[in-house]
């Protein structure tokens, strides 16, 4: 079985055989650590604003090695934190402004992909969240009421009855659905490698297989020597935990995916998703799926264990129990897939802060951005624009969003971290069943995430 569908047969465009031996400059204007979405979007907007600014991107592995090249391909307006939390950091008006910025960001990603000639299969078909039991029905009604309280219901959040929902997604036990138009399906690795190609064509140096050993506000010591800079940006998301001093800033949570073989037209007629809508249902333990441009289903979810000490390893990138659970869920939703082969299975770590809140801004003189909790395809574009404005010293509507300068409290030390995170995952799974104690388990999970 193959590993990551998105990276199957895709090289890093614009890279040459000499890239690993090119001598790094001693001094540049900006060093960016990490060649994923956050780092490359930042470099992109910096270069657009000031083509003469010298930029070096260093990447320990290859472009898009982390979550940027392995995610579910949802370019969505979803934020990792609630609007209530955003309002508590600022005001209700600022929370609503941030949500509208996210709606605009979904379109911005599509505009930039088109402008740069990146064929990432961008299709803004929206997101449909199936309602498949009474608890999920309550979740849907609560979501619509909450959206209304923020003035965000109507076209932005639609509650569909079963017949209308089935026109988009024909899943089992369908009682209705939530529909959000502000979501696009993409091929995530094509987007990140396309960004790298564009940057290289514009003269931005991207040094792959070049690890940042340590860094401060003016210096990055790399595996190929030191580089001084006027600005240092860290865009390493879950891999930030590789530095011992940052091990409790975020935790690496693993998410797993599978992909089916390409489906024939009759199978797609039975399933729906004619507009390539992204899809899930409203269970607590997150699942997510999309109809790919080549006619497969790419489907993922949580459930893989957190590893003691915030460890990250290639050996964790597949997890057979989670793979089998995803296959079972997919076939339960769509019985027509019972004889369809799974051709790919992969996973990887995403970053979560202790308060589930993303952040961007200076930390000990180094500019950082991230903690997207799996919602990074669009949010990383917004953060890249913010970081570019911060480097330029501009005071803009972007640099004033509430999470700029936010600092989450540290995660608990081990073994409390390992016990707590894995216990919450077990409770989330339990809460999605009809077994005794499911409601209590759900309340515990919700209280932690709220």
Image (cartoon, rainbow, N blue to C red):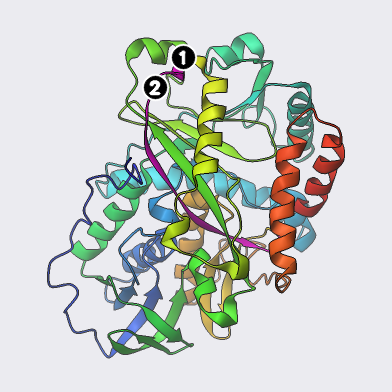
Name the spot of residue 150 as percent of width and height, x first: 75, 41
Categorize mark 1 by other alpha carbons within 10 Å: few (<14), some (14-19), many (20+).
some
Residue 400 vertical position relative to residue 247 in the rendered view, above or below: above
Name the spot of residue 377 as percent of width and height, x first: 47, 50
Whether residue 223 appears in magenta in the rendering, the answer is no
Q: Which residue is drawn at 79% across and 38% down?
A: 149
Task: Find the magenta span and give its range.
Answer: 337-355
Q: Which mark is residue 374?
A: none
* Left or right, 386 with reference to 276: right
* Left or right, 209 with reference to 165: left
Q: Residue 340 carries which label?
A: 2
* Left or right, 311 with reference to 155: left
Residue 167 vertical position relative to residue 418 in the rendered view, above or below: above
Frontmost residue, 169 versus 363: 169
On the image, numbered disc 1 is attached to which residue? 336
The reply to whether residue 76 is visible in this rendering is no
Q: Residue at x 62, y 32 (%)?
A: 156
Q: How many marks?
A: 2
* Disc 1 to disc 2, C-alpha distance: 8 Å
Frontmost residue, 59 versus 445: 445
Name the spot of residue 315 as percent of width and height, x first: 44, 58
Residue 269 vertical position relative to residue 399 in the rendered view, above or below: above
| Quadrant showing the N terminus | top left
């Amino acid at each position: 079985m193959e590993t990551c569908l998105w990276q199957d047969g895709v090289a890093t465009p614009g890279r040459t055989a000499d890239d690993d031996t090119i001598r790094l400059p001693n001094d540049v204007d900006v060093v960016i650590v990490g060649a994923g979405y956050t780092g490359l979007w930042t470099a992109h907007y910096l270069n657009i604003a000031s083509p003469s600014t010298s930029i070096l991107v260093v990447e320990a592995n290859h472009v898009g090695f982390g979550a940027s090249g392995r995610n579910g391909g949802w370019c969505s307006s979803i934020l990792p934190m609630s609007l209530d939390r955003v309002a508590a950091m600022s005001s209700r008006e600022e929370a609503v402004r941030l949500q509208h910025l996210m709606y605009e960001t979904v379109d911005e990603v599509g505009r930039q992909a088109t402008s740069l000639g990146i064929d990432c299969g961008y299709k803004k078909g929206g997101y449909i969240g199936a309602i498949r039991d009474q608890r999920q029905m309550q979740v849907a009604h609560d979501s619509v009421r909450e959206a209304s309280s923020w003035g965000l219901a109507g076209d932005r959040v639609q509650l569909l009855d079963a017949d209308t929902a089935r026109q988009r997604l024909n899943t089992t036990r369908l009682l209705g659905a939530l529909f959000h138009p502000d979501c696009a399906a993409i091929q995530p690795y094509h987007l990140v490698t396309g960004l790298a190609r564009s940057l290289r064509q514009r003269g931005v140096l991207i040094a792959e297989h070049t690890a940042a050993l340590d860094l401060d506000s003016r210096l990055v010591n790399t595996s190929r020597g030191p580089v001084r800079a006027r600005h240092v940006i860290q865009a390493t998301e879950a891999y930030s935990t590789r530095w011992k001093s940052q091990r409790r800033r975020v935790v690496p949570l693993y998410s797993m995916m599978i992909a089916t073989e390409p489906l024939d037209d009759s199978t797609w007629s039975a399933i729906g998703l004619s507009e390539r809508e992204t899809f899930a249902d409203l269970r607590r333990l997150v699942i997510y799926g999309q109809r790919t441009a080549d006619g497969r289903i790419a489907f993922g979810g949580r459930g893989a264990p957190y590893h003691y000490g915030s460890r990250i390893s290639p050996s964790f990138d597949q997890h057979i129990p989670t793979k089998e659970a995803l296959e079972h869920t997919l076939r339960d939703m769509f019985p027509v897939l019972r004889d369809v082969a799974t051709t790919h299975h992969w996973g990887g770590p995403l970053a979560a802060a202790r308060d589930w809140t993303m952040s961007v801004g200076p930390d000990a003189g180094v500019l950082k951005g991230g903690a997207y909790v799996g919602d990074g395809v669009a949010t990383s574009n917004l953060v890249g624009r913010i970081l570019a404005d911060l480097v330029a010293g501009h005071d803009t509507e972007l640099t004033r969003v509430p999470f700029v300068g936010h600092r989450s409290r540290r995660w608990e030390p081990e073994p409390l971290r390992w016990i707590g995170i894995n216990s919450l995952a077990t409770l989330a799974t339990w809460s999605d069943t009809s077994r005794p104690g499911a409601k209590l388990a759900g309340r515990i999970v919700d209280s932690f995430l709220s």
